[in-house]
Image: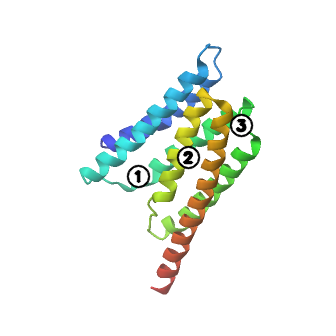
Amino acid sequence: MGIPNILTLLRIFLTPLYAIVFFSNSKYNLYYATLIFFIAGITDVLDGTIARKYNIITKWGTFFDPFADKLMLLTALSCLTAAHIIPVWIIITIAIKEILLVISGYTVFRKGTLIPSNKFGKAASALFSVSMLILVLNQKLGIYIMYISVLAAIVALFSYLKTIFQKLNQLNKQ
């Protein structure tokens, strides 16, 4: 299985823990949930770094790594929406974006091709992480950074879709 895939699995298991802690009666539940979110983010960076450095990139990891990221992000945004910390349109926008990515990604995956993450997707993920931290410290400022994160995610979506359509064109010409 390898360390990168184990870290991806850990991230998947951290997702329900995030929600449990978020909705707990703890005085510091939002802080603890944010800590879990950042631990998941660290595992994401580590699994990618280790996989690339030691050339242990697997199809399983290439598929489940972004799945784990999407699962954690959508869970965190759902919790923040349910707690009325962020507006509902954010989770709807990001959910639609992720559904489009999964459908289009699956289309090229069926043809034996994987679309790796790109700089726009990584920037959007980083912005979401920053906005989560700032939301805990200053909700007013955090929500504005969350808006910028959503915009970055939309830019990433169009970048991925462009890459996917180019790849599909190449595959169809073969």
How far from the left and from the top, in percent, is residue 18?
56, 29
Residue 138 image label: none
Q: Secondary structure at mark 2?
A: helix
Q: Are marks 1 and 3 in contact (CB under 8 Å)?
A: no
For the C terminus, the quadrant is bottom left
Percent across and percent down for residue 62 are 41, 54
Residue 50 in the image: state x and y as whole percent.
Answer: 29, 46
Marks 2 and 1, how far apart at CA: 16 Å
Amino acid at pointer 2: Lys
- Left or right: residue 34 versus residue 24 is left
Looking at the rendered structure, the kind of residue marked 1 is Trp
Sequence-first tag of 2 and 1: 1
**Residue 60 numbered tag:** 1
Tally of numbered discs: 3
Q: Amino acid at mark 3?
A: Ile
Between residue 101 and residue 33, name the one nearer to us: 33
Q: Residue at x 60, y 65 (%)?
A: 158
Q: Nearer the viewer, residue 157 or 11?
A: 157
Q: Is residue 52 above or below residue 26?
A: below
- Mark 2 and mark 1 residues within 8 Å of each other at the beta carbon: no
The residue singled out by tag 3 in the image is 86
- Measured in 3D between alpha carbons, the distance from the residue under mark 3 to the one under mark 2, in whole angstroms, is 18 Å
Tell me if residue 72 can be seen: no
Query: Considering only vertical position in the picture, is 20 above or below 78?
Result: above
Marks 1 and 3, the one that precedes in the sequence? 1
User: From what the image shows, is residue 104 above or below residue 152?
Assistant: below
Counting residues from the N terminus, which is met first, the one under dot 3 or under dot 2?
A: 2
Which residue is tagged 2?
A: 70
For the residues labelled 1 and 3, the Cα–Cα distance comes to 33 Å
| Mark 1 neighbour density, 10 Å: few (under 14) some (14–19) many (20 or more) | few
| Residue 33 visible within the image | yes
